[in-house]
Amino acid sequence: MKIRSHAQWHQLFQEQATSGQDETAFCAAHGIARPYFRQRRRELSGDGSGKGLSAFVPVAVARASEPAAVDLRFGPVALRLPASVSVRWLADLLHALKD
């Protein structure tokens, strides 16, 4: 028996659907047992049986174009600090500016 990936099975399902052949003829032409073809279609279609494709979708997290920052404005003066700045340091700075 030939081992096929999920993508290869989906390609076969698509080919069968657009070939104009019924399952019996298509499976015979491709050397696939019809019951196995149907079983794989059912398993990979996500029919709710708990089998088949995972409900999880792979994702990629994009990095922000700019690092996170804290902006402080005092009238016309603006100060941009990295978001990783120590809260204690920031409190000390604000306290010093207040005096």
Image (cartoon, helix red, strand yellow):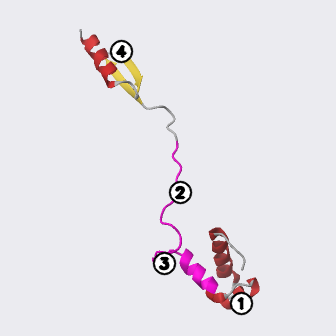
- The numbered mark at residue 25 is 1
Could you tell me the amino acid type at mark 2?
Answer: Pro
Q: Earlier in the sequence, mark 2 or mark 1?
A: 1
Camera-near label (3 vs 1) is 3
Task: Measure the C-alpha gap from mark 2 to mark 4.
Answer: 44 Å
Q: Residue beneath label 3, please?
A: 47
Question: x, y percentage for residue 69?
Answer: 41, 28
Camera-near label (4 vs 3) is 3
Q: Secondary structure at mark 3?
A: loop
Main secondary structure along the magenta-highlighted residues: loop
Task: Measure the C-alpha gap from mark 3 to mark 1.
Answer: 24 Å
**Which range is magenta?**
36-62
Q: Residue beneath label 2, please?
A: 58
Task: Measure the C-alpha gap from mark 1 to mark 4.
Answer: 78 Å
Q: Earlier in the sequence, mark 1 or mark 4?
A: 1
- The numbered mark at residue 81 is none
Q: Earlier in the sequence, mark 2 or mark 4?
A: 2
> In this rendering, is residue 29 above or below 14?
below
